[in-house]
Image (tube, rainbow, N blue to C red):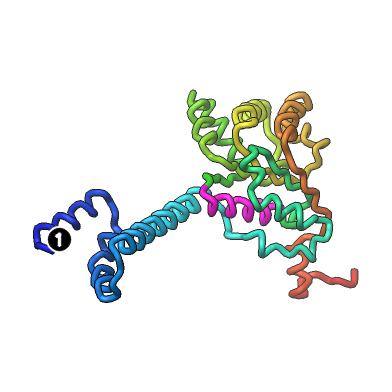
Amino acid sequence: MSNLTYERLHANLQYLKLDTIESTVDNYLEIATKDGKTVMEVLDYLIDQERLIKENTARERKMRLAMFPVQKRVEDFDFDFQPSIDKTVILDLASLRFVHNTENVVLMGPPGVGKSHLAIGMGIEAVNAGFKVYFVNAGALVEGLKNANLNGILEKKLKALAKYDVLIIDEMGYLPFDREGAHCFFQLVSRRYERSSMIFTSNKSYGEWGEIFHDHVIAAAILDRILHHCTTINIKGESYRLKERKKHGLINMEK
């Protein structure tokens, strides 16, 4: 290989942003020559390595943008501690069929039973599968929508949220929404209806969602869209946090 050809090869690889090939081609060509590899085998290996690195980089970027508060996986969930959950249903959800079908998931139950753990776990599975995911607290989400509405950029905000394949809304019901917040939330749900998936966690039953929105009519309209294509998981068990406190002797178990 002439110096001109060598320099042009590296210049073109840099120009095309094939950084992995550019950094490994010299060593691999030397190894390939010794091993008698064909041109096709060399190209296949180098291009495959470039693809793998780009996929990993894209996955890591999506994981950062998802804004998961912690890294919790479905396989780490203690199903034995929460026997009210049908593990087969959760594993089916983790297969992401609901995302492909633009369906929703609602995880319902008292605080500390693992709702957020499962929601995050499904979100991580979705990121690993190449989907765009965003995790947000319900209160923070609604405040963001209200601020956007106040500044006349609600439509822009809704479009930004619509780009995510899976929107995870955590802690529905811990704080009530005012009338403006309820209407903004309704617009978000309507925008995503039958277009992309949402995962909700809530400590309130559906019958109590009217209290969240201070309006039973708008609550019914929101639930109608969420539940049209939806899997509901009711978790009826003890709090994991309470379990850990008992484990460390921080609660008098004789009471």
Q: Is residue 55 left or right of residue 129?
A: left
Q: Is residue 131 left or right of residue 201?
A: left
* Image location of residue 36, percent across then percent down: 28, 72
Q: Is residue 229 magenta?
A: no
The residue that appears at 62% across and 43% down in the rendered structure is 99
Write down the quadrant of residue 231 in the picture.
Answer: top right
In the rendered image, the vertical position of residue 130 relative to residue 37, given as above or below? above
Which residues fall within the magenta stretch?
115-130
The residue that appears at 68% across and 54% down in the rendered structure is 118
Q: Residue lying furthest right in this view? A: 255
The residue that appears at 52% across and 44% down in the rendered structure is 132
* Image location of residue 1, percent across then percent down: 13, 64
The residue that appears at 38% across and 59% down in the rendered structure is 48
Q: In terms of secondary structure, what is the magenta stretch mainly?
A: helix
Q: Is residue 126 magenta?
A: yes
* Image location of residue 152, percent across then percent down: 49, 23
Q: Which residue is mark 1?
A: 6
Q: Is residue 211 left or right of residue 33?
A: right
- In the picture, the quarter occupied by the C terminus is bottom right
At mark 1, the secondary structure is: helix
Write down the quadrant of residue 56 in the picture.
Answer: bottom left
* Image location of residue 156, percent across then percent down: 48, 28
> Which amino acid is tagged 1?
Tyr
